[in-house]
Image: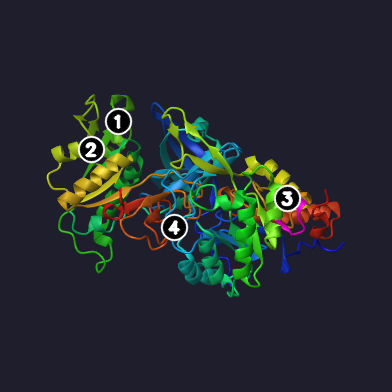
Amino acid sequence: MKSAELSVDFAGHHFRNPLTVASGTFGSGMEYSRYVDIGRLGAITTKGVSSVPWEGNPTPRVTETPSGMMNAIGLQNPGIDVFIERDLKFLEDYDVPVIVNVCGHSVEEYEAVVERLADDDRVEMLEINVSCPNVKQGAIQFGTDPDMLTEVTQRCKTKAKDKPVIMKLTPNVTSIADMARAAEAGGADGISLINTLTAMKIDIYRRKFVLANKTGGLSGPAIHPVAVRMVYEASHAVGIPVIGMGGVATYADAIEMMMAGATMVAVGMISFTEPEAILNILSGMERYMEETGTEHIRDIIGIL
Amino acid sequence: MVNMQDNISIKSKARITEKTELADGIYSMTLCADLCSKAEPGQFVMVYPNNGAKLLGRPICIASVKKDTADSGEDLLRIVFRTVGDGTREIASYGEGDRLFIEGPLGHGYPTDEAISDRKHIVLLGGGLGAPSLLYLAESLTVLMNTESTVAENAVPKIQEKPHITAILGYRDCSLKHFLADDFRGLGINTVIATDDGSEGLKGNVIDALKETVKEPDLIYACGPLPMLSAVKKYAGAAGIKAYISMEERMACGVGVCLGCVAKTVKEDPHSHVKNARVCTEGPVFDADEVDI
């Protein structure tokens, strides 16, 4: 039997395997490159970057929850100038396609970042974060109102020129299918989901919220079944490809995500526990394909 | 293309060789582990509960490192921690012979070069669970000072007189059984105990005790709760004394990726390009002048 073929095509771009990391769980690879050969990833998705540096939220910003965690980092990032000079420069040394996650408080801020990256050959695709629950102004509003989502998508598409634009969706909506269709209507080349679920934790002895932001985004294996359901619903509502994410921690989770309709899969918070998890998932997928006689990984995408 | 570098610090399996409850909810644990690189005082390890539903490590500072000369030649790592939630309670439930995963040593510890240059009186201020990281510092300083004459002559100015070290340990009350105080005394370090309610030692906090007992400190190392560290910064700033403080914050990754554990800084941090430094990476020890607390 031929060896398992893991490569996939996404929005006209070819990737050697379907695995990337979820934005914000891997930085730009600088820290984890000590632990993980990032040249083996299908792609690297960098932490959200905005037009100017963002301070983020007060601490505590993170807390553990059963089989997961909550965060309210608030998209702290050094801004697009430093990102281009430092982070993209760092990634030049690695043979890995780069998906840049873009955040903003306003449509103009998204456009400003997209414009800076549109002609940069080091960038493979753009992922627009319209779904961060931890930023008060903008961000999630664009991802919860279908008309606004269509508009942001259109305007980012115009500035992105030939770069594929992926809209990253929030699960904190009534109908994920409607939001997927809104992104597609705006001309999105793909969608990615799910971002974190808005959550809350209270310290009953201190009688206070655990996170300074009161609410935070829930991630990790605890949310995986929710993510599978939403990837299924979204992928069946549109013709554009999907990056599935949400609590993927094992090869089985990744295979499940693809069967639900994802063309690519992002590994998220489990990297905090085990940075090399993504490589273990990759070898697990190969083993699964060999054991089940699956020649090409694309054959399982959306089979249900 | 970049080749994989040698792993600097990775998760490794550690065996518990000893566990003692020092006071109510405060545990000392010795782990036999390969730390991969030398641990500096002030650094920490991430300790992972074995429970698969608890995915994040718990950052715990290193209280001591010794070579296990009798047995495996591995490092004997001592941690001292308080049970604050389900994770630390679970770690505390493990006993001798049990194994768990640790990662480290991580972060930047206490700079010690200055201590052996021209200081006369070094003060260690430990509030509550701040004492453990200072214990490893005290051990290291003691070793450094005893071997100071063999240190490269060019790098370090010749010392006429060894600096005096005083450890001031603050506790809520006597129920905490002045945990670790005897370890400091065992190193030959002048050790002062202060309690908030005066039930043991001097009455008051560590700053009160410092003012009462040490005339002219010229270097302070401090670890403890945030209000104490703010007070140390204020005191040291006003008196023109150099102070290094070790900060505590909730962490997810422990290696600078998640940006969960930031401390406010006075100037723009060169990594983040905002006024936030990562406690796990730039810290946990900071020059008191650099943090905005």
Q: Residue at x 24, y 55 (%)?
A: B115
Q: Amino acid at mark 2?
A: Val
User: Mark 1: which secondary structure?
Assistant: loop
Q: The residue marked by circle 2 belongs to what chain? A: B
Sequence-wise, the earlier of marks 1 and 2 is: 1
SS assignment for the magenta stretch, majority: loop
Q: Residues within 10 Å of mark 4 (few under 14, many from 20)?
A: some
Q: Nearer the viewer, residue B38 or B110?
A: B110
Q: Residue at x 42, y 40 (%)?
A: B79
**Marks 4 and 1: in contact by CB < 8 Å?**
no
Q: The residue marked by circle 4 belongs to what chain? A: A
Q: Which residue is mark 2?
A: B206
Q: Are marks 2 and 4 on the same chain?
A: no
Q: Which residue is mark 1?
A: B178
Q: What is the number of the mark on residue A234?
A: 3
Q: For marks 3 and 1, give the CA distance.
A: 59 Å
Residue A44 coordinates in the image, percent (x, y): 61, 62
Q: Which residue is mark 4?
A: A54
Q: Is residue A35 left or right of residue B175?
A: right
Chain part drawn in magenta: A237-242
Q: Residue at x 18, y 40 (%)?
A: B210
Q: Nearer the viewer, residue B185 or B293?
A: B293
